[in-house]
Image (cartoon, grey):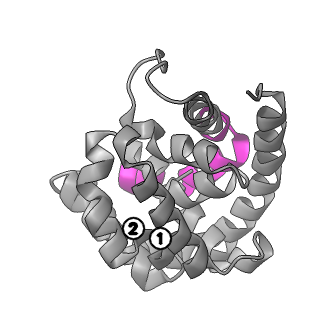
Amino acid sequence: MNYLAHLLLSGNDIELRIGNFIADSVRGKNLSRFPERVAQGITLHRAIDTFTDTHDIVRESKNLIRDQYGLWSSVIIDLYYDHFLAANWSDYSDVPLEEYTLKFYKDLEQHWEILPRRIQNFYPIMVEYNWIYSYRTIDGMSKILYQMNKRTKGKSKMDLAGKELKEHYTELESQFREFFIELQAYSKDMIQKMPLD
């Protein structure tokens, strides 16, 4: 899953959400430099990724685009799924998506000192263009895919993946919805098992 799903799956716990967001920029198993709840968010993120990457429904989604994008299909499906979450946001949250994302950017700013350098570097651009909010439209997602392709120096061809999103839209959305029910239950269970201070 990509950014938006990881945020939502953290529930209402700000530090858990921060950890879940920064996890891809944190290396290693020693998380002692982070507050305990942030470290738990990193652990939750990794568990969500493993659950997602090994799930049969997600595999079906990847198979729809694997011939075109090979190993990059995992990243693309993560982005597609975030699009479906954003496009149907009111089904999953009572807080409007733009309000939710703007609040999260403020939370990041308030935890600036623990953010990895990579996050600090792209934070201003993310806020200026409101990346997460832009996931809700196909046009916005196409711009994200274009940027992702630039980051891979054109190797991924992700800039073309808006075509498959449109082509397989109904099937992908159905797969996302079915999978996300399971992922929400899994994440909730993981959080309930985490010790609180």
Of the numbered discs in the image, which one, if any, rests on residue 161? 2
Q: Secondary structure at mark 1?
A: helix
Q: Is residue 5 above or below residue 135?
A: above
Q: Quadrant of residue 83?
A: bottom right
| Outermost residue toward the top in this view | 30
What residue do we see at 84% from left, 35% from top? 192
| Residue 11: % across, % down | 73, 53
In the picture, the quarter occupied by the C terminus is top right
* Residue type indicated by callout 2: Ala
Is residue 65 on the magenta stretch? yes
Q: In the image, is residue 187 above or below residue 27? A: below
Q: Residue at x 55, y 80 (%)?
A: 98
Query: Is label 2 in a helix, a strand or a loop?
Result: loop
Q: Where in the figure is residue 2, as x and y percent of width and height?
A: 52, 54
Q: Which residues are magenta?
A: 50-69
Residue occupying image coordinates x 65% and y 68% = 85
Q: What residue would you read off at disc 1?
A: 164
For the residue carrying disc 1, how many other residues have a C-alpha within 10 Å: few (<14), some (14-19), or many (20+)? Answer: some
The residue depicted at 62 percent of the width and 34 percent of the height is 37
